[in-house]
Amino acid sequence: MTQPNQSEALGALRLQIDALDQQLLSLLNLRARVAEQVGEIKRQEGSPFFRPDRVAQVIEKIQSANQGPLLNQHVASIWREIMSACLALEAPQRVAVLGPQGTFCEQAAVDFFGGAANLIYCANFDEVFHATAAGTAQYGVVGMENSTEGVVARSLDLFLRSPVHVVGEVSLLIRHNLLRQVNHLDGIEVVMAHPQALAQCQNWLSQHLPHAERRAVSSNAEGARLAATNPAWAGLASERAAAQFGLHIVAHAIQDEAYNRTRFAVICLPQTLAMPPASGKDCTSLVVSVPNRPGAVHDLLVPLKNNGVSMTRFESRPAKSGQWEYYFYIDIAGHPSQPHVAAALQELKGLCAFYKVLGAYPVAD
């Protein structure tokens, strides 16, 4: 008996894949119909449609059952998109991000909410906070901290008087690419990007484009958009932005630090989504100020030490009062529902002239 040739074998496998695709489609639509029923119950109860802790639980359960060959990270991406598409049938989520299209902030939002979210593009982080606080968007995504350049100071300042809180975070590997209309380095007069991106690529720019002007703009995607209007201009942005504005990637991954990550915070009003429950791997963020007296800052650390709570970040920002006063932004490991964390926060609050919990949320991988 003769063996089927390669073409016949390939054809048979493709037919098998086609049949499996039809089965998957039927199951996905069945899941979507069940999700619609869940959405109707949530609507009657007045409970939140989007629950990031529920998304995490479902993905973790699916990954635990995964026996390959799909990698767990790919399984997570697939299920996040499935859940995003189903959620869009219940109630599309409006999410404010830094625009235009093609920003890393946009990518962080897609990573957290999935591709079915309704993104609202804002000119700066001030607008993201305002849109979220005003209800134009249910959620917002803002940059918080970069592993190379440190905190995003404007975001920290905006948290002080905004009613929003943090309900999640995304840690994104940042690769800056030089984008341009033409595919070479000759004749570049201006390089445009967000100030942090210019700082993160300063060594490469000094070596390869020492005479080009470095022009700060509101976002990397805005720099890419402007680069598409003038052949003498270039932008520093993502591959997503290159595709969005039809630009060549003249140089890939030119950031000075290979392991360059940015933390993005997911924000919303407490009435949109309350503080997520403890996940077992959480971060609590707060901002405090203390009376201007000797040893006051040292005293802030004592309640944490006494209760065995680890501090993971400590930043200071001027209070802008003209009195040399400061606000201190603190991240601690743990959740306020844990007794030792609750005890530490209660003691800490008693020492502070100003005290505000910015949020407690699962730590991003």
Image (cartoon, grey):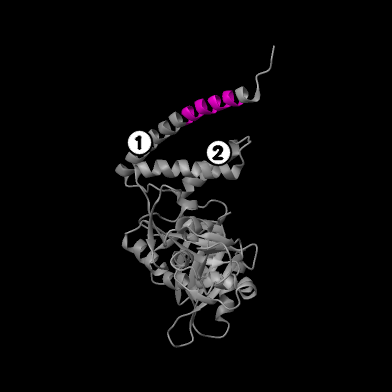
Residues in magenta, as a range: 10-24
- Residue at image position (33%, 39%) is 41
Residue 71, placed above or below residue 237: above
Residue marked by disc 2: 62
Say which amino acid is labelled 2. Ile
Q: Is residue 60 visible?
A: no
Pinpoint residue 39: horizontal percent, then vertical percent: 35, 41
> Upstream in the sequence, badge 1 or badge 2?
1
Say which amino acid is labelled 1. Gln
- Residue at image position (53%, 85%) is 293
Residue sitting nearer the eye, 214 or 320: 214
Residue 256 in which image quadrant: bottom right
Tag 1, which secondary structure? helix
Residue marked by disc 1: 37
Residue sitting nearer the eye, 335 or 273: 273
State how many labels appear: 2
Tag 2, which secondary structure? helix
Quadrant of the image containing the N terminus: top right
Residue sitting nearer the eye, 250 or 14: 250
- Residue at image position (34%, 46%) is 91
